[in-house]
Image: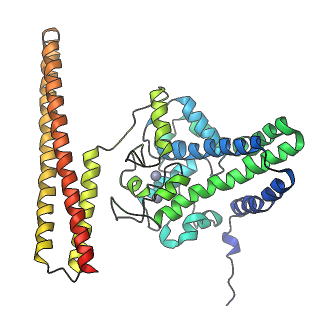
Amino acid sequence: MPFRLPASRINWTNSSFLIGTLVLTCTAVPAYLWVCGVDLFQVAMFLAFFSATGLSITLGYHRLFSHMAFKASWPVRLVTLVFGAAAFENSAMHWVSDHRRHHKHVDGEMDPYDISQGFWYAHMGWILFKLDAEPPLDNIADLRKDRLFMLQDRFYVPVAVGVGFVLPALLGYWHAGWTGALGGLLLAGVARVTAVQHMTFFINSLCHTIGSQPYSDKCSARDSWIMAIFTFGEGYHNYHHEFQHDYRNAVKWWQWDPTKWTIWTLAKLGLVRDLRSVPEEKILLTQLTDTRRRLGERLACSKVGANARLHELLQASDAKLHELGERWAALKAEYAGRAGALKAQYAEKAGAMKTEYAERKAEYTGRAIAQFDEAKAALAEMRRELQQALRVLELAAA
Ligand SMILES: [Zn+2]
Ligand SMILES: [Zn+2]
Protein backbone atom coordinates (compact mmCIF):
# COMPACT_ATOMS: atom_id res chain seq x y z
CA MET A 1 0.00 0.00 0.00
CA PRO A 2 1.50 3.38 -0.96
CA PHE A 3 2.46 5.67 1.92
CA ARG A 4 0.04 8.60 2.23
CA LEU A 5 0.76 11.75 4.17
CA PRO A 6 -2.16 12.81 6.35
CA ALA A 7 -2.61 16.15 4.50
CA SER A 8 -5.15 17.48 6.97
CA ARG A 9 -2.63 17.16 9.77
CA ILE A 10 0.25 18.92 8.04
CA ASN A 11 1.09 22.25 9.61
CA TRP A 12 1.74 24.09 6.34
CA THR A 13 3.24 27.26 7.83
CA ASN A 14 5.77 25.41 9.99
CA SER A 15 6.51 22.79 7.34
CA SER A 16 7.08 25.30 4.52
CA PHE A 17 9.38 27.39 6.70
CA LEU A 18 11.38 24.43 8.05
CA ILE A 19 11.75 22.65 4.72
CA GLY A 20 12.20 25.94 2.81
CA THR A 21 15.09 27.20 4.97
CA LEU A 22 16.71 23.75 4.88
CA VAL A 23 16.46 23.53 1.06
CA LEU A 24 17.82 27.07 0.62
CA THR A 25 20.72 26.28 2.99
CA CYS A 26 21.63 23.26 0.87
CA THR A 27 21.23 25.01 -2.51
CA ALA A 28 21.22 28.84 -2.54
CA VAL A 29 23.88 29.21 0.19
CA PRO A 30 26.57 27.07 -1.55
CA ALA A 31 25.63 28.71 -4.89
CA TYR A 32 26.13 32.18 -3.37
CA LEU A 33 29.49 31.14 -1.86
CA TRP A 34 30.52 29.63 -5.23
CA VAL A 35 29.72 32.81 -7.15
CA CYS A 36 30.67 35.53 -4.61
CA GLY A 37 33.37 33.72 -2.62
CA VAL A 38 33.86 33.62 1.15
CA ASP A 39 33.78 37.07 2.73
CA LEU A 40 35.21 37.38 6.27
CA PHE A 41 32.56 39.94 7.22
CA GLN A 42 29.81 37.48 6.27
CA VAL A 43 31.50 34.66 8.19
CA ALA A 44 31.84 36.88 11.28
CA MET A 45 28.20 37.95 10.97
CA PHE A 46 27.09 34.29 10.67
CA LEU A 47 29.02 33.38 13.84
CA ALA A 48 27.75 36.45 15.74
CA PHE A 49 24.10 35.75 14.83
CA PHE A 50 24.55 32.01 15.51
CA SER A 51 25.93 32.69 19.01
CA ALA A 52 23.43 35.46 19.85
CA THR A 53 20.36 33.47 18.80
CA GLY A 54 21.70 30.10 20.02
CA LEU A 55 22.60 31.44 23.46
CA SER A 56 19.28 33.29 23.68
CA ILE A 57 17.57 29.91 23.33
CA THR A 58 19.80 27.97 25.78
CA LEU A 59 20.33 30.76 28.33
CA GLY A 60 17.07 32.67 27.90
CA TYR A 61 14.25 30.43 26.62
CA HIS A 62 15.61 27.33 28.35
CA ARG A 63 17.51 27.90 31.60
CA LEU A 64 15.97 31.27 32.51
CA PHE A 65 12.33 31.20 31.40
CA SER A 66 11.61 27.44 31.36
CA HIS A 67 13.49 26.45 34.51
CA MET A 68 13.93 29.71 36.46
CA ALA A 69 17.50 28.62 37.17
CA PHE A 70 18.41 32.24 37.98
CA LYS A 71 16.87 35.72 38.05
CA ALA A 72 17.69 38.17 35.27
CA SER A 73 17.58 41.95 34.97
CA TRP A 74 15.42 43.45 32.21
CA PRO A 75 18.31 44.05 29.72
CA VAL A 76 19.17 40.31 29.80
CA ARG A 77 15.50 39.36 29.41
CA LEU A 78 15.05 41.84 26.56
CA VAL A 79 18.13 40.71 24.60
CA THR A 80 17.36 37.00 24.98
CA LEU A 81 13.71 37.55 24.00
CA VAL A 82 14.64 39.60 20.90
CA PHE A 83 17.39 37.28 19.65
CA GLY A 84 15.48 34.20 20.86
CA ALA A 85 12.63 35.23 18.53
CA ALA A 86 15.16 35.47 15.68
CA ALA A 87 15.90 31.74 16.11
CA PHE A 88 12.37 31.08 14.72
CA GLU A 89 11.49 28.52 17.37
CA ASN A 90 8.17 30.16 18.26
CA SER A 91 7.56 32.75 20.99
CA ALA A 92 9.11 32.14 24.40
CA MET A 93 5.60 31.55 25.80
CA HIS A 94 4.91 28.54 23.54
CA TRP A 95 8.51 27.26 23.75
CA VAL A 96 8.50 27.32 27.56
CA SER A 97 5.08 25.70 27.79
CA ASP A 98 6.17 22.86 25.48
CA HIS A 99 9.45 22.43 27.32
CA ARG A 100 7.87 22.29 30.76
CA ARG A 101 5.51 19.60 29.49
CA HIS A 102 8.51 17.74 28.05
CA HIS A 103 10.09 17.58 31.53
CA LYS A 104 6.86 16.72 33.29
CA HIS A 105 5.78 13.95 30.92
CA VAL A 106 9.13 12.94 29.43
CA ASP A 107 8.91 9.84 27.16
CA GLY A 108 5.15 9.75 27.59
CA GLU A 109 2.17 10.57 25.39
CA MET A 110 1.91 14.14 26.72
CA ASP A 111 5.59 14.87 25.99
CA PRO A 112 5.51 17.19 22.92
CA TYR A 113 8.73 15.74 21.54
CA ASP A 114 8.32 12.21 22.83
CA ILE A 115 11.35 10.14 21.74
CA SER A 116 9.38 6.90 22.05
CA GLN A 117 7.51 7.98 18.90
CA GLY A 118 10.78 7.78 16.96
CA PHE A 119 13.92 9.78 16.34
CA TRP A 120 12.50 11.98 13.55
CA TYR A 121 9.31 12.69 15.41
CA ALA A 122 11.34 14.00 18.39
CA HIS A 123 13.67 15.89 16.06
CA MET A 124 11.21 17.83 13.90
CA GLY A 125 8.20 15.65 13.07
CA TRP A 126 6.26 17.07 16.02
CA ILE A 127 6.51 20.55 14.46
CA LEU A 128 5.48 19.48 10.97
CA PHE A 129 2.18 17.98 12.02
CA LYS A 130 -0.73 19.56 13.84
CA LEU A 131 -1.54 18.10 17.20
CA ASP A 132 -4.98 16.55 17.61
CA ALA A 133 -5.78 19.08 20.30
CA GLU A 134 -3.60 22.11 20.99
CA PRO A 135 -2.48 21.77 24.61
CA PRO A 136 -3.48 24.73 26.81
CA LEU A 137 -0.88 27.24 27.95
CA ASP A 138 -1.67 26.44 31.57
CA ASN A 139 1.85 25.96 32.92
CA ILE A 140 3.35 29.43 32.55
CA ALA A 141 1.34 31.40 35.13
CA ASP A 142 4.55 32.53 36.85
CA LEU A 143 5.71 34.27 33.66
CA ARG A 144 2.51 36.13 32.83
CA LYS A 145 3.50 39.06 35.02
CA ASP A 146 6.70 39.60 33.00
CA ARG A 147 5.73 42.36 30.56
CA LEU A 148 8.65 41.74 28.20
CA PHE A 149 7.78 38.05 28.02
CA MET A 150 4.15 38.85 27.19
CA LEU A 151 5.08 41.52 24.61
CA GLN A 152 7.43 39.12 22.82
CA ASP A 153 4.55 36.71 22.29
CA ARG A 154 2.40 39.52 20.83
CA PHE A 155 5.04 40.84 18.44
CA TYR A 156 6.85 37.57 17.79
CA VAL A 157 6.60 37.51 13.97
CA PRO A 158 7.78 41.11 13.23
CA VAL A 159 10.62 40.77 15.78
CA ALA A 160 11.69 37.39 14.37
CA VAL A 161 11.64 38.56 10.74
CA GLY A 162 13.18 41.96 11.55
CA VAL A 163 16.08 40.69 13.65
CA GLY A 164 16.49 37.29 11.99
CA PHE A 165 16.38 38.28 8.30
CA VAL A 166 16.10 42.06 7.74
CA LEU A 167 18.91 43.06 10.14
CA PRO A 168 21.61 40.77 8.62
CA ALA A 169 20.51 41.86 5.12
CA LEU A 170 20.83 45.55 6.11
CA LEU A 171 24.25 44.97 7.68
CA GLY A 172 25.30 43.10 4.53
CA TYR A 173 24.06 45.98 2.36
CA TRP A 174 26.03 48.46 4.49
CA HIS A 175 29.13 46.28 3.99
CA ALA A 176 28.93 45.48 0.27
CA GLY A 177 25.75 46.76 -1.41
CA TRP A 178 23.10 44.41 -2.85
CA THR A 179 25.46 41.41 -3.11
CA GLY A 180 26.29 41.89 0.57
CA ALA A 181 22.59 42.16 1.43
CA LEU A 182 21.87 38.85 -0.32
CA GLY A 183 24.85 37.27 1.48
CA GLY A 184 23.66 38.55 4.86
CA LEU A 185 20.16 37.24 4.23
CA LEU A 186 21.41 33.82 3.08
CA LEU A 187 24.26 33.25 5.58
CA ALA A 188 23.52 35.07 8.87
CA GLY A 189 19.79 34.75 8.06
CA VAL A 190 18.70 31.49 6.42
CA ALA A 191 21.73 29.21 7.01
CA ARG A 192 22.08 30.43 10.60
CA VAL A 193 18.36 29.79 11.33
CA THR A 194 18.74 26.24 9.98
CA ALA A 195 21.85 25.64 12.10
CA VAL A 196 20.32 26.96 15.36
CA GLN A 197 17.04 25.14 14.82
CA HIS A 198 18.68 21.78 14.22
CA MET A 199 20.96 22.40 17.20
CA THR A 200 17.84 22.67 19.38
CA PHE A 201 16.13 19.75 17.63
CA PHE A 202 19.16 17.52 18.28
CA ILE A 203 18.75 18.10 22.02
CA ASN A 204 15.29 16.57 21.73
CA SER A 205 16.37 13.74 19.43
CA LEU A 206 20.06 12.79 19.81
CA CYS A 207 20.32 13.78 23.49
CA HIS A 208 17.54 11.27 24.16
CA THR A 209 19.27 8.61 22.04
CA ILE A 210 23.08 8.63 22.32
CA GLY A 211 25.40 9.02 25.30
CA SER A 212 25.62 7.84 28.89
CA GLN A 213 23.25 7.96 31.85
CA PRO A 214 25.47 8.63 34.85
CA TYR A 215 22.74 10.09 37.06
CA SER A 216 19.59 8.18 36.32
CA ASP A 217 17.90 5.92 33.80
CA LYS A 218 14.40 6.94 34.86
CA CYS A 219 14.03 8.63 31.46
CA SER A 220 15.73 8.47 28.06
CA ALA A 221 17.86 11.64 28.52
CA ARG A 222 21.60 11.16 28.00
CA ASP A 223 24.88 12.95 28.59
CA SER A 224 26.99 13.44 25.46
CA TRP A 225 30.08 15.67 25.24
CA ILE A 226 29.89 15.65 21.43
CA MET A 227 26.37 17.08 21.60
CA ALA A 228 27.49 19.62 24.22
CA ILE A 229 29.98 21.07 21.73
CA PHE A 230 27.24 21.81 19.18
CA THR A 231 24.61 22.94 21.69
CA PHE A 232 26.30 25.55 23.90
CA GLY A 233 26.63 22.95 26.66
CA GLU A 234 23.12 21.50 26.57
CA GLY A 235 24.45 18.03 25.67
CA TYR A 236 24.68 17.03 29.34
CA HIS A 237 21.03 16.20 29.17
CA ASN A 238 20.95 13.32 31.65
CA TYR A 239 22.18 15.67 34.36
CA HIS A 240 19.72 18.30 33.21
CA HIS A 241 16.70 16.01 33.45
CA GLU A 242 17.78 14.89 36.93
CA PHE A 243 18.44 18.42 38.21
CA GLN A 244 16.45 20.69 35.91
CA HIS A 245 16.63 23.85 38.05
CA ASP A 246 20.43 23.94 38.11
CA TYR A 247 21.82 26.83 36.05
CA ARG A 248 24.56 24.44 34.92
CA ASN A 249 24.17 21.47 32.58
CA ALA A 250 27.81 20.46 32.92
CA VAL A 251 29.10 20.26 36.49
CA LYS A 252 32.67 19.11 35.98
CA TRP A 253 35.18 21.87 35.28
CA TRP A 254 36.48 20.24 32.10
CA GLN A 255 33.05 19.83 30.52
CA TRP A 256 31.97 22.23 27.77
CA ASP A 257 29.12 24.50 28.88
CA PRO A 258 29.41 28.05 27.45
CA THR A 259 25.83 28.81 28.55
CA LYS A 260 26.88 28.23 32.17
CA TRP A 261 30.00 30.37 31.73
CA THR A 262 27.92 33.20 30.23
CA ILE A 263 25.42 33.08 33.13
CA TRP A 264 28.33 33.10 35.62
CA THR A 265 29.92 36.10 33.86
CA LEU A 266 26.60 37.97 33.77
CA ALA A 267 26.27 37.32 37.52
CA LYS A 268 29.71 38.83 38.12
CA LEU A 269 28.60 41.86 36.11
CA GLY A 270 25.50 42.17 38.29
CA LEU A 271 23.10 41.51 35.40
CA VAL A 272 21.72 38.22 36.76
CA ARG A 273 21.45 36.88 40.32
CA ASP A 274 20.25 34.01 42.56
CA LEU A 275 21.89 31.27 40.51
CA ARG A 276 20.48 27.91 41.56
CA SER A 277 22.80 24.92 41.80
CA VAL A 278 22.59 21.47 43.34
CA PRO A 279 25.07 20.79 46.21
CA GLU A 280 28.01 18.65 45.20
CA GLU A 281 27.29 15.92 47.75
CA LYS A 282 23.76 15.48 46.40
CA ILE A 283 25.10 15.04 42.86
CA LEU A 284 27.68 12.51 44.08
CA LEU A 285 25.10 10.54 46.06
CA THR A 286 22.75 10.44 43.07
CA GLN A 287 25.56 9.19 40.86
CA LEU A 288 26.56 6.57 43.41
CA THR A 289 23.02 5.35 43.97
CA ASP A 290 22.70 4.88 40.23
CA THR A 291 26.02 3.04 39.95
CA ARG A 292 24.98 0.75 42.81
CA ARG A 293 21.64 0.05 41.16
CA ARG A 294 23.31 -0.82 37.87
CA LEU A 295 25.76 -3.09 39.66
CA GLY A 296 22.89 -4.80 41.44
CA GLU A 297 21.08 -5.34 38.14
CA ARG A 298 24.18 -6.83 36.60
CA LEU A 299 24.74 -9.12 39.54
CA ALA A 300 21.15 -10.28 39.37
CA CYS A 301 21.23 -11.23 35.71
CA SER A 302 24.88 -12.20 35.32
CA LYS A 303 26.23 -15.72 35.25
CA VAL A 304 28.57 -14.66 38.06
CA GLY A 305 25.55 -13.71 40.12
CA ALA A 306 26.39 -16.44 42.56
CA ASN A 307 29.84 -15.01 43.19
CA ALA A 308 29.86 -14.49 46.94
CA ARG A 309 32.71 -11.96 46.91
CA LEU A 310 30.86 -9.64 44.53
CA HIS A 311 27.69 -9.85 46.58
CA GLU A 312 29.67 -9.03 49.68
CA LEU A 313 31.21 -6.04 47.94
CA LEU A 314 27.83 -4.81 46.82
CA GLN A 315 26.33 -5.20 50.27
CA ALA A 316 29.26 -3.39 51.86
CA SER A 317 28.95 -0.53 49.38
CA ASP A 318 25.23 -0.40 49.94
CA ALA A 319 25.66 -0.12 53.71
CA LYS A 320 28.37 2.50 53.32
CA LEU A 321 26.20 4.56 50.99
CA HIS A 322 23.32 4.38 53.43
CA GLU A 323 25.53 5.32 56.37
CA LEU A 324 27.08 8.21 54.46
CA GLY A 325 23.68 9.58 53.50
CA GLU A 326 22.52 9.46 57.12
CA ARG A 327 25.72 11.08 58.34
CA TRP A 328 25.22 13.87 55.87
CA ALA A 329 21.68 14.53 56.99
CA ALA A 330 22.77 14.53 60.67
CA LEU A 331 25.70 16.86 60.00
CA LYS A 332 23.53 19.27 58.07
CA ALA A 333 20.86 19.32 60.80
CA GLU A 334 23.50 19.84 63.49
CA TYR A 335 25.11 22.67 61.58
CA ALA A 336 21.78 24.36 60.84
CA GLY A 337 20.73 24.04 64.51
CA ARG A 338 23.94 25.55 65.83
CA ALA A 339 23.99 28.31 63.26
CA GLY A 340 20.35 29.11 64.14
CA ALA A 341 21.09 29.20 67.89
CA LEU A 342 24.07 31.47 67.33
CA LYS A 343 22.01 33.74 65.13
CA ALA A 344 19.31 34.01 67.81
CA GLN A 345 21.92 34.81 70.44
CA TYR A 346 23.44 37.38 68.15
CA ALA A 347 20.08 39.05 67.60
CA GLU A 348 19.68 39.32 71.39
CA LYS A 349 22.98 40.89 72.20
CA ALA A 350 23.98 42.33 68.88
CA GLY A 351 26.89 44.50 70.03
CA ALA A 352 28.59 42.32 72.63
CA MET A 353 28.11 39.09 70.76
CA LYS A 354 29.39 40.39 67.45
CA THR A 355 32.99 39.27 67.81
CA GLU A 356 32.12 36.01 69.49
CA TYR A 357 29.59 35.18 66.79
CA ALA A 358 32.10 35.91 64.04
CA GLU A 359 34.69 33.69 65.74
CA ARG A 360 32.26 30.87 66.36
CA LYS A 361 30.87 31.13 62.86
CA ALA A 362 34.37 30.74 61.45
CA GLU A 363 34.94 27.79 63.75
CA TYR A 364 31.73 26.08 62.70
CA THR A 365 32.26 26.89 59.03
CA GLY A 366 35.78 25.48 59.26
CA ARG A 367 34.46 22.34 60.91
CA ALA A 368 31.73 21.96 58.30
CA ILE A 369 34.26 22.35 55.49
CA ALA A 370 36.52 19.71 57.08
CA GLN A 371 33.56 17.36 57.48
CA PHE A 372 32.52 18.01 53.90
CA ASP A 373 36.02 17.22 52.63
CA GLU A 374 36.09 14.06 54.70
CA ALA A 375 32.72 12.93 53.36
CA LYS A 376 33.80 13.81 49.83
CA ALA A 377 36.96 11.71 50.17
CA ALA A 378 34.87 8.81 51.49
CA LEU A 379 32.51 9.17 48.54
CA ALA A 380 35.40 9.25 46.07
CA GLU A 381 36.83 6.12 47.65
CA MET A 382 33.49 4.42 47.45
CA ARG A 383 33.12 5.41 43.83
CA ARG A 384 36.53 3.89 43.08
CA GLU A 385 35.45 0.75 44.90
CA LEU A 386 32.26 0.54 42.86
CA GLN A 387 34.05 1.19 39.60
CA GLN A 388 36.53 -1.54 40.48
CA ALA A 389 33.68 -3.90 41.24
CA LEU A 390 32.06 -3.00 37.93
CA ARG A 391 35.26 -3.75 36.05
CA VAL A 392 35.67 -7.10 37.83
CA LEU A 393 32.10 -7.94 37.02
CA GLU A 394 32.48 -6.97 33.39
CA LEU A 395 35.57 -9.20 33.15
CA ALA A 396 33.82 -12.06 34.87
CA ALA A 397 30.72 -11.68 32.71
CA ALA A 398 32.68 -11.52 29.43
ZN1 LIG B 1 14.91 16.36 27.25
ZN1 LIG C 1 15.04 21.66 30.24
- What color scheme is it? rainbow
Q: Residue furthest top?
A: 351
Residue drawn at x 67%, y 76% is: 6
* x and y percentages locating residue 147 in the rendered image: 57, 34
In this rendering, the answer to whether 362 lies above or below 101 is above
Which is nearer the eye, 46 or 200?
A: 46
Q: Is residue 155 left or right of residue 210?
A: right
Residue 359 falls in which quadrant of the image? top left
Tell me the quarter of the image containing the C terminus. Answer: bottom left
* x and y percentages locating residue 240 in the rendered image: 41, 53
* x and y percentages locating residue 139 in the rendered image: 47, 50
Tell me the quarter of the image containing the N terminus. Answer: bottom right
In this rendering, the answer to whether 233 lies above or below 294 is above
* Residue 113 visible in the snapshot: no
* Residue 298 visible in the snapshot: yes
In this rendering, the answer to whether 313 lies above or below 283 is below
